[in-house]
Image (spheres, rainbow, N blue to C red):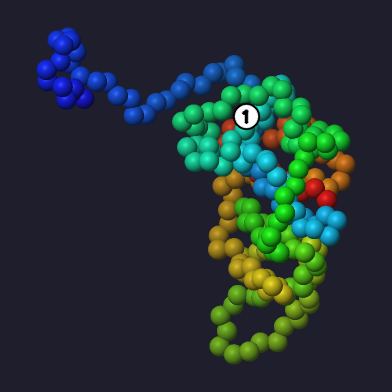
């Protein structure tokens, strides 16, 4: 763009060159990183309702070199994680993250760096692909509601469904769920855009996490953002 100063001292200066966008070429020798969205799910602990605190919003993990890139919620606004992950400013790769809550969870280590915060909402519902992650203070009674156009009443057998305090629920496209304190609408369409990996960190199997991550094909890791649901209970 031309310089606004017409009486410039430098007669060789024709204008200012401004970069408004940029692209970076990928390194073919770069080791594979798997990208995850972290969802801290509330849980009941010692008569309190809490969730994990101070966790990043998104992470990319190298299962071979045990390295990590992590983003805060604010930093993710300048990124795209749909197909190939790209950011205007990518945080540095961290090699020393052993003293972190996330590392302790993923390696099934003793939890010394994890912190929790109070959860004020009694009901947590998170849509993840075609599933719903639900957390409540107590068990919840529900009934399935069939979405059918009827001109008159019909007689059906609709048994009561009891949900535990933490559950990952799948409903089909024809069924909604009417519960004591909330109503879940049926899915409007199948969402297969993302491969969804749900890990319930409640039993001692998380030490096999990195072997589980490596079972995904290179295509799946390159083309999809995986979601990691963290629950401590």
Residue placed furthest toward the bottom: 152
What residue would you read off at disc 1? 69
Residue drawn at the location 15% of the way across and 15% of the way down = 8
Foreground of the two, 105 or 200: 105
Q: Residue 88: horizontal and vertical position, in percent?
A: 46, 31
Residue drawn at the location 61% of the way across and 41% of the way down = 57
Locate residue 160 relative to residue 130 in the image: left or right.
Answer: right
Q: Residue 51: horizontal and vertical position, in percent?
A: 73, 51
Above or below, 72 against 151 in this view is above
Above or below, 136 against 31 in this view is below
Q: Residue 127: horizontal and vertical position, in percent?
A: 62, 56
Above or below, 9 against 26 in this view is above
Mark 1, residues whose alpha carbon is within 10 Å: few (<14), some, or many (≥20)? Answer: many
Foreground of the two, 115 or 31: 115
Locate residue 151 relative to residue 198 in the image: left or right.
Answer: left
Residue drawn at the location 62% of the way across and 29% of the way down = 69
The answer to whether residue 226 of the structure is visible from this angle is: no
């Amino acid at each position: 763009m031309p310089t606004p100063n017409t009486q410039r001292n430098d007669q060789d200066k024709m204008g200012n060159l401004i970069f408004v966008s940029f692209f970076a070429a990928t390194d073919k020798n770069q080791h594979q990183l798997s990208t995850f969205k972290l969802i801290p799910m509330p849980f009941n602990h010692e008569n309190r309702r809490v969730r994990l605190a101070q966790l990043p919003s998104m992470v990319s993990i190298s299962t071979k070199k045990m390295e990590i890139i992590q983003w805060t919620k604010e930093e993710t606004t300048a990124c795209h994680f749909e197909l190939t992950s790209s950011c205007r400013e990518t945080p540095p790769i961290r090699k020393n993250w052993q003293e972190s809550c996330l590392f302790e969870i993923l390696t099934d280590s003793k939890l010394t760096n994890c912190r929790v915060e109070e959860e004020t909402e009694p009901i947590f519902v998170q849509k993840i692909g075609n599933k719903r992650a639900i957390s409540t203070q107590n068990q919840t009674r529900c009934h399935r509601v069939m979405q059918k156009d009827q001109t008159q009443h019909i007689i059906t057998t609709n048994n009561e469904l009891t949900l535990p305090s933490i559950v990952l629920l799948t409903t089909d496209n024809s069924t909604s769920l009417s519960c004591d304190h909330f109503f879940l609408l049926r899915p409007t369409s199948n969402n297969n855009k993302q491969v969804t990996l749900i890990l319930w960190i409640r039993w001692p199997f998380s030490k096999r996490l990195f072997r589980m991550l490596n079972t995904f094909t290179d295509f799946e890791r390159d083309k999809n953002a995986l979601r990691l649901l963290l629950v401590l209970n």
